[in-house]
Amino acid sequence: MESISHLLIVIAVLSGVTFLTRALPFMLLYKVAEHPTLVYLGRYLPPVLMVLLVLYTFKDVDFSGAGLAPELLGISLVTVLHLCFRQPLLSIVGGTALYMVLLQGGLLGG
């Protein structure tokens, strides 16, 4: 087993590297932040990624019978919560919680 000081050094180094990988693009690219390509990507990439995540959700779903119900109800709740409150975290947590309750509770398939 490694010593506690060795583990703390590893955690510190990994934390520093993680911080740099997150902060470096902002530090290096601040002069081109208003470039039309970056503005375009910032506007349209998040919705495209959300559509890809929804499609990925249905990748392994059996479309016959009631096996689809938890997914559809979860996505429906995410949609309703987002349209009502415009809080992404609330939408994601609410939809995930409903999906897990339905799936783990055995209420609608799974």
Image (spheres, rainbow, N blue to C red):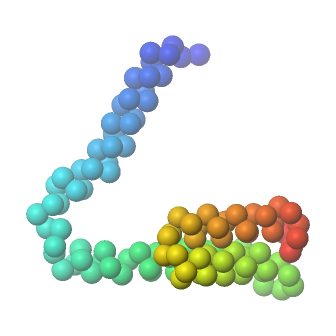
Q: Is residue 51 left or right of residue 44?
A: right
Q: Is residue 85 visible?
A: yes
Q: Residue furthest bottom?
A: 64
Quadrant of the image occupied by residue 93 = bottom right
Q: Which residue is depicted at the point 31% across and 48% down?
A: 21
x, y percentage for residue 34?
16, 73
101 in relation to 67, above or below: above
Q: Is residue 31 left or right of residue 98?
A: left
Q: Which residue is depicted at the point 38% across and 77% down?
A: 45
Q: Is residue 55 visible?
A: no
Foreground: 53 or 78? 78
65 in relation to 30, above or below: below
x, y percentage for residue 91?
58, 70
Q: Is residue 32 left or right of residue 60?
A: left
4 in relation to 14, above or below: above
Quadrant of the image occupied by residue 55 = bottom right
Quadrant of the image containing the N terminus = top right
x, y percentage for residue 54?
59, 77
x, y percentage for residue 2?
53, 16
Q: Which residue is depicted at the point 66% across and 70% down?
A: 95
Q: Residue furthest left?
A: 31
Q: Is residue 62 left or right of residue 38?
A: right
Quadrant of the image containing the C terminus = bottom right
Q: Which residue is depicted at the point 45% across and 18% down?
A: 6
Foreground: 66 or 90? 90
